[in-house]
Amino acid sequence: MRTKTRNGRLVTALAALFAFALFAAACGGDDDNDTSSATTAAPMTTDHLGDGSLGVVQVEPGGAIQIRSLEAITGDVAFLGLPIERATMLAIEDYGPIHGFEVDLGTTLDDLCSNDGGQAAAQTIVADEDVLGVIGTSCSGAAVAAAPLITGAGMVLISGSNTSPALTSDLAGTAGENYNVGYYRTAHNDLFQGAAMAEFVFDELGLTDAAAVHDGDPYTQGLVQAFADAFEALGGTVTGISAINKEDTDMVPVLTEIATGAPEALFFPIFQPAGDFMADQAPGVPGLEDTVLLAADGLLNTNYLARAQTADMYFSGPDTRFGENENESTGRTAQEFLATYEERWGEAPAAAFWAHGYDATTLLLDAIEAASWVDSDGNLNVDRQGIRDHLNGVEGYGGMIGTISCDDFGDCGAGRITVVQNIGGEENVGASMTNVVFSYTP
């Protein structure tokens, strides 16, 4: 019932007036001597989603609505978190105030792309009882630790880049082992990404034997298993699944073990710096000289593509061909966003999930608006359960990434996946990011 204007301000007045008219008519507004309808109608100022079961946060006049950003913004995975953090900032600017109240991102936090980092940052966030929701985390491993704390405090956590199936579901109605009520994401479920890479290797490359490597992270382990299951379902043979530690630098022992299976393809959806060593050392291991190397969105960034050893590699990741897609809450297109981003920070986003972060932020802001009202003292009141009620009901929302609908386990993103091939050379990284050689739609 909300009407969008071009500047992103959402108007609820018509819906409220309509509800008031229906209410007044039901209460017998024709009777001049009946004063009960006027007395009863006063609470219409509290028209909002939610039942108060998770508490209500009150913002006094002059105060600001509090949300937080929790991304990997330092270290080897900063390429992933920084664009999402910046997208969150731009989304807040584009959206504007909610019921006249500004939105404050506060001090942004770092998930360090780790379980410990996610837990420590989440503890800081939940210590502030005014925080309503969090955009993050960047990495699934950080979300495993952060999500129980954040959602347990009545807040919501919405990620633009978590993809582990364990955080949501198996897409067949069974909750993942790390699912928490109050967790949502605009990124895809890696069951789709695993299937996409399997189809590419088996059907497009015509390879029937493949091996895979993970580093024990929920993201990498889940994606490797999704790939292996899908590849075998197509008729391929998985010659081995191996594990490394994130801190490993000598990959020769595990690569030598992998080579005994004579795989035609090797899929390692891990992060840097371990991914650097895999690409550097694999071609020098006997039996892997001609093995096709494949990775995923954890390595699909400009820094990795610039490395000489990654030339001709294939990478799966979200379909970022957004064209003229427009975020319905702000009216901002992907192209407009990119122009603003490059003007503000002097570079293009280094990784693929910037639009997912933007859409995650506007979904949260819409939910806060739907769950809030201004009382007679001028305070803004926000019903925590109402935020979840709104997100649970998202269907057919127009985002930069395309149409967004949330299922029962918080999966809201599209399952469209592409595979790109690295052209090679630092001068070609931009072209490589969009060098699509295979597209997958569930």
Image (spheres, rainbow, N blue to C red):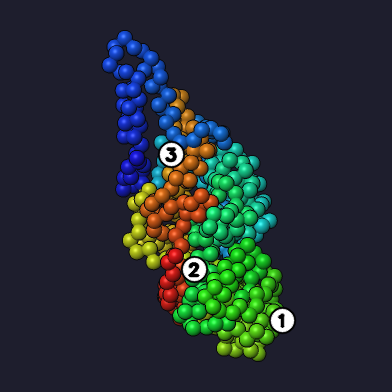
- Whether label 1 touches label 2, CB < 8 Å: no
User: Is residue 73 at least partly visible in the picture?
Assistant: no
For the residues labelled 3 and 2, the Cα–Cα distance comes to 33 Å
Above or below residue 185? Residue 216 is below
For the residues labelled 3 and 1, the Cα–Cα distance comes to 55 Å
Above or below residue 98? Residue 239 is below
- Residue nearest the observer in this picture, 128 or 352: 352
Determine crowd level at label 1: few under 14, some 14-19, many 20+ residues with C-alpha closer than 10 A.
Answer: few
Residue at the outermost top position? 33
Residue at the outermost right position? 253
Q: Which mark is residue 225?
A: none
Q: What x and y, as percent, mark residue 293? A: 56, 80
Amino acid type indicated by mark 2: Gly
Q: What x and y, as percent, mark residue 249? A: 69, 76
- Whether label 3 touches label 2, CB < 8 Å: no
Which quarter of the rendering shows the C terminus? bottom left
User: Is residue 34 at least partly visible in the picture?
Assistant: yes
Above or below residue 342? Residue 42 is above
- Residue nearest the observer in this picture, 193 or 79: 193
- The residue at which mark 2 appears reads as 317
Q: Which mark is residue 370?
A: 3
Residue in the image at 34% along x and 35% along y: 15
Disc 2 is placed on an element classified as strand
Residue in the image at 60% along x and 38% along y: 129
Q: What x and y, as percent, mark residue 266? A: 59, 79
Q: Which mark is residue 253?
A: 1
Determine crowd level at label 3: few under 14, some 14-19, many 20+ residues with C-alpha closer than 10 A.
Answer: many
Above or below residue 195? Residue 164 is above
